Image (tube, helix red, strand yellow):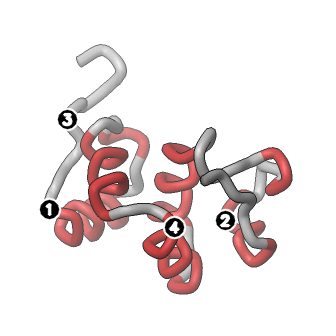
Amino acid sequence: MSKSLPAFLQPVFWSYQLTDLDTDTHETLIIKQILNHGSTPAVTWLRSTYTEATIQAVIANSMVSEWSKKSLSLWSKVYNTTPRRQSRFA
């Protein structure tokens, strides 16, 4: 079931209007943005909104270049997965 994002997430999505995003259509964007830039409450919201398998799939199907080094290191360990692609061309 698609839902809108809560207002407290606006700082994580500084270049987006929250009203333009929903949890189904923008799943990949939301997960990457929160894992890369989110606060503890943002990550708590993320984990209550998406399943562990969904978050793992987003990480696995992403490119290394889409992550900060620290974020990738942390979330790869937490979710026991890493991006399968090194770049857009690999």
Amino acid found under the numbered disc labelled 1? Asn
On screen, residue 69 versus residue 42, left or right, reads left
Are dots 1 and 4 in contact, CB under 8 Å? no
Question: What residue is at 57 percent from the left and 76 percent from the top?
Answer: 42
Amino acid found under the numbered disc labelled 4? Thr
- Residue occupied by mark 4: 49
Specify the label residue 12 is tagged with. Answer: 2
Amino acid found under the numbered disc labelled 3? Arg
Amino acid found under the numbered disc labelled 2? Val
Where disc 3 sits, the SS reads loop
Q: Nearer the viewer, residue 70 or 54?
A: 54
Distance between mark 1 and mark 4 Cα atoms: 19 Å
Distance between mark 3 and mark 2 Cα atoms: 25 Å
Q: Nearer the viewer, mark 3 or mark 4?
A: 4
Crowdedness near tag 2: few (<14), some (14–19) or many (≥20) residues, C-alpha within 10 Å:
some
Distance between mark 1 and mark 3 Cα atoms: 13 Å
- Residue occupied by mark 1: 80
Q: Nearer the viewer, mark 1 or mark 2?
A: 1
State whether residue 45 is above or below residue 90.
Answer: below
Q: Sequence-wise, which precedes: disc 3 or disc 4?
A: 4
